[in-house]
Image (cartoon, rainbow, N blue to C red):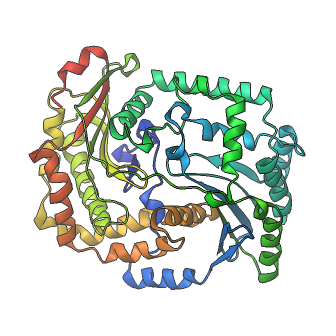
Amino acid sequence: MTRFNTHTAPRARTSASALFFACALALTLLLSSCASSRGASSFYADNIRDFETKTLSNGIPVIVKQNHGSKIVVFRMIFEGGSSVIDENLGGIEKLTLSLMLHGSEKFIYEDIQKREYENSFSFTSSAGRDYSTAGFTCIQRNVDEALAIFTDGVFHPLFSETDYTQAVTKAENTIAQKASDPSGALGTALSKAAFSGTPYATAVSATKETLPNITLEKIESHHASLLNASRIKIVIIGDFNSDLLSDFVSRLDESFGLIEAKPFALPSIPDFAPNGENVFVANAQAGDTGYITGIFPCPERTSAEYIPFAIASMYIDDLFFSIVREKHGAVYSIGSGVVGGKKLLGAISIYKATEKAQLKEFTYEAIDAFDEKSVASKLDQYKNKYISSIFSSSQSSAGVASSVIASLEYHGSESAYLKRAELVQKVSAKQVIAAYKKYFQPITKENAAQWIVVDGAENLSKYDF
């Protein structure tokens, strides 16, 4: 689940609760800058001029964001589609393919790559997602030629050895076993089925017990070939380049990635999500006497004018969750709200380590109903400032900037959209926040609009009132 805000350690918002399920890219990566309106406008003006887009011979766009004064270069290749364009029976194949693609090539054996990474302080990375996946590297600028050469050979000529494949499968099997025994992992699996069954998001991003046997080395090689399609590739580069350096770098990209053939490719249509079934109860021996719970409910889309007001309303709700469900009733270790999904979303309430069973729903609803419309205006600036400042650090590193650019590009259609987010936050009114609460949170208690997924010991499941 993507959380809208972060709390300090005493609020027990630990990283453990983040294991509930695979996160969509965080809204917080889409916001940056200082809290004042003047600062937000200045942030946009200071950064928008640093964007430049080049185009390779085959149409692949190369989005460059200057990061003045930084010696770090971040290179990311985006593959459109992600798991949403993959058959459900092959869920996890893209993640395995990208990992093996960077695990040795014709010119560079993996042990040599590891040695070079250590000696030159650069790293190769890949990430699979529902809507898109990425692969790339981070390095000091003086090593960019070497890193690019290794990455390029991995993209075009991956080794894909039987030994590496076997090791990757064994690692995946261990991860699957750990996830099945862990209550947080069991909740993530159940949540995905409840929220996305019958949609393109039903295909798992990571291999599962059901899909792993279907992922042969031959199918990985075939999937790799399908990724080499200029119609589904974008490149994002973050660094400090003068005109000559940038021109030379893009020329070298054109000599390699510019030769990839452009083939027909269409993204799937993602439906609007809504809770569509009965509550789900999953027995898990490792849960012991504690519950791991998620409630999903309708929420606005990322591009909706209601999205930021909804996010701010969730900050009010989270404080009520903490003060009422955790502190007043001592019912949980952690509870908070956010979103799940990708291009299309569902709102989510996550409850981590619930010790109260019978009255947990009552306490959760009590917190939601305690929303005080009269206090919204008095706290609004505080929440706006907290919202923006809590994510500012993510845009201080080159990797953080790359994440913001990619998320903006994929979810808002513009690489620079994130520059305006802080300014949009400042424009939110108390009236909008109240309206978002009434539309999205209030129905949870008034109409039982949420669908709940509960993981606990088998003997405890019947005790819940969800």
Residue 99: give x, y in percent of width and height.
69, 40
Find the residue positioned furthest to the front. 264
Against 46, is 361 above or below? above
**Residue 35 visible in the displayed image:** no
| Residue at point 24%, 40% (across, down) | 326
Give the number of marks. Answer: 0
Q: Position of residue 14 (x, y in %)?
A: 42, 42
Q: Position of residue 11 (x, y in %)?
A: 34, 46
Question: Which quadrant is home to the N terminus?
Answer: top left
Q: Nearer the viewer, residue 239 or 152?
A: 152
Q: Residue at x 54, y 35 (%)?
A: 91
Up the image or down, 362 lies above or below 134; here it is: above
Please name whichever residue, 403 or 316, is drawn nearer the observer in this view of the structure. 403
Q: Is residue 19 visible?
A: yes
Q: Residue at point 39% right, 42% down?
A: 199
Which residue is nearer to you in this view: 263 or 28? Answer: 263
As drawn, the residue found furthest toward the top would be 459
Residue 93 shown left or right of residue 425 in the figure: right
Q: Residue furthest right?
A: 107
358 left or right, relative to 190 = left
Position of residue 451 in the picture relative to residue 9 (left or right): left
